[in-house]
Image (tube, grey):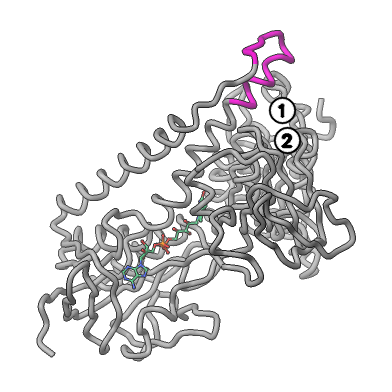
């Protein structure tokens, strides 16, 4: 058929991958059309992911800090929570960023088209609009259609009390009893939010540790604090089914240690995310999609069809916004004719729980499993004056070094601001730093960042006694 619109580059999906790609490509002179099914730009990350969750986690952190202040003689009393106002704050944060993105698109003359796209050929996308269809012809395309929550079977999904992460972020109410199914990053972040707001939270995790993928020792301070705050955690435990009844959601568990409570006011299912690769008519464009819905790409983010790229959550793990943006920039530059490829060595992971948990590069578990010759240096925050001052001695900073080259190849940090602190180690790994390089860098005192240098000095042998 005849095309209604034409463009150099079509970007499908306006999440962090898609909008970054679109903006970069426009900056490089390409005529870009950005197709997004929702009116608001920003994708999962801005609308129902990273940003609203962090806005709510900030409220939770303030509540806990205020509570904690009793320990040093400052009592704010019991928090009064105006849920409408809190929800409004979160929505305002998102709306402000939505507006910013729309402005940035306009400034760059990136055209946006609101509708759901599906390929009809290797050079054409059909977009189902609010009313009618539009056919777009493109020379090149970047697929950035992201992912969505896995809907576990056996759950009464038509009951509004059964929630995925999007529902949980809507903050309809603070349930008295909340069951969180899945102890990964998203589940634990929401457990922190709801627990601080006053819910009695139970977390069940199928694996033998919370946040599988992170080292066990890194997760322990979080597990301990959750326990102290009355969050029940059950490992190696599975929810067999949930029945929706008038008086609540009734859960049946299987496993070694199952919760004694079986009736909940709400259930959050956070067991992972599934890529949207199989939902965009990729086959019509000749783009290969794996059985699980991922789109394989090369080091330039090209799919098997050379003029079609794919980025973000739908090309694979880790499903993180900063990975999507990095890939988006790369794909846009390659589409604009630059001879580039993926060069980043590591992608940091952060859980914005309390305490925060961050890791990058090789984990200790991974090093052991692969039989790598590594040195591990751990600096306990109990030896940091700053950490003692803020009452967070449970934290620690761990660096992992290649035993032969002394180069840092991994790190794990747990404690407040771990997510900010890990960036330095990511840079160190990218630059091939040795322990001595970090140790010789003067870090400001008294900051938590010193813990990175201290760990490096332990490895370097220049510190033998922590005090
Ligand atoms: P997405 O953000 O999923 O965007 C894809 C876009 O494509 C969507 O807007 C979608 O509507 C659109 N789309 C899909 N199909 C079509 C179609 N056929 N036609 C038109 N449009 C389409 N990551 C972090 O790094 N840090 C965090 O703190 C963090 N917190 C998170 C918290 C939660 C609760 C969740 C759910 C996720 C979180 N993530 C976090 C993950 C992060 O949101 C994703 O990794 C990121 O959004 C992926 O970006 P993307 O561009 O690949 O896709």
Give the image location of residue 275, x and y in percent. 49, 72
The residue at the far top in this view is: 73
Quadrant of ligand 1: it is bottom left
Residue sitting nearer the eye, 159 or 253: 159
Q: Residue furthest front?
A: 246
Query: Which residue bears the numbered disc 2?
Result: 395
The reply to whether dot 2 and dot 1 touch (C-beta < 8 Å) is yes
Marks 2 and 1, how far apart at CA: 6 Å
User: Which residue is the site of mark 1?
Assistant: 392
Rendered view: 408 above or below 176: below
Q: Main secondary structure of the magenta part?
A: helix
| Residue 30 covered by magenta stretch | no
Instruction: Say whether residue 70 is magenta.
Output: yes
Q: Give the image location of residue 14, x and y in percent.
A: 32, 61
Question: Which range is magenta?
Answer: 63-77
Q: Residue at x 57, y 68 (%)?
A: 151
Q: Quadrant of residue 3?
A: bottom left
- Residue 38 quadrant: bottom left
Would residue 408 be found to the left or right of residue 158 on screen? right
**Quick one: SS at disc 1?**
loop
Q: Secondary structure at mark 2?
A: loop
Q: Residue at x 54, y 40 (%)?
A: 173
């Amino acid at each position: 058929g005849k095309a209604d619109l034409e463009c150099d580059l079509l970007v499908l999906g306006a999440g962090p991958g898609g909008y970054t790609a679109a903006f970069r490509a426009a900056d490089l002179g390409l005529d870009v059309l950005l197709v997004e099914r929702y009116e608001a730009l920003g994708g999962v990350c801005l609308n129902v992911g990273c940003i609203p969750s962090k806005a709510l986690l900030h409220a939770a952190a303030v509540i806990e800090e205020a509570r904690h202040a009793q320990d040093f003689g400052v009592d704010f009393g019991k928090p009064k929570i105006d849920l409408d106002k809190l929800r409004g704050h979160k929505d305002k944060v998102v709306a402000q960023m939505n507006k910013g993105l729309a402005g940035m698109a306009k400034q760059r003359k990136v055209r946006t088209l609101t509708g759901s796209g599906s390929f009809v050929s290797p050079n054409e996308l059909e977009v189902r609009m609010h009313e009618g269809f539009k056919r777009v012809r493109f020379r090149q395309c970047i697929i950035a259609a992201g992912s969505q929550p896995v809907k576990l079977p056996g759950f009464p999904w038509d009951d509004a009390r059964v929630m995925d992460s999007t529902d949980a972020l809507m903050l309809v109410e603070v349930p008295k009893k909340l069951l969180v199914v899945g102890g990964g990053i998203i589940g634990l972040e929401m457990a922190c939010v709801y627990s601080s707001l006053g819910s009695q939270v139970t977390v069940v995790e199928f694996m033998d540790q919370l946040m599988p993928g992170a080292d066990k020792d890194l997760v322990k301070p979080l597990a301990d604090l959750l326990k102290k705050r009355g969050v029940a955690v059950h490992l190696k435990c599975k929810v067999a089914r949930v029945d929706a009844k008038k008086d609540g959601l009734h859960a049946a568990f299987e496993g070694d240690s199952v919760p004694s409570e079986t009736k909940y006011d709400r259930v959050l299912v956070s067991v992972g995310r599934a890529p949207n690769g199989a939902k965009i008519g990729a086959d019509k464009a000749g783009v290969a999609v794996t059985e699980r819905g991922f789109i394989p790409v090369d080091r330039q983010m090209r799919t098997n069809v050379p003029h079609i790229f794919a980025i973000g959550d739908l090309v694979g793990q880790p499903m993180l916004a900063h990975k999507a943006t990095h890939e988006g920039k790369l794909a846009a530059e390659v589409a604009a004719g630059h001879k580039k490829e993926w060069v980043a060595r590591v992608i940091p992971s952060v859980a914005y729980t309390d305490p925060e948990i961050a890791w990058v590069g090789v984990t200790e578990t991974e090093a052991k499993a692969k039989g790598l010759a590594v040195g591990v240096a751990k600096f306990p925050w109990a030896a940091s004056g700053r950490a003692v001052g803020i009452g967070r001695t449970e934290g620690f900073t761990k660096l992992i070094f290649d035993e032969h080259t002394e180069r840092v190849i991994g790190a794990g940090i747990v404690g407040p601001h771990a997510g900010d602190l890990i960036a330095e180690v990511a840079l160190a790994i990218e630059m091939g730093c040795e322990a001595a390089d970090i140790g010789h860098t003067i870090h400001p005192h008294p900051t938590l960042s010193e813990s990175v240098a201290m760990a490096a000095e332990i490895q370097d042998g220049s510190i033998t006694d922590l005090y």
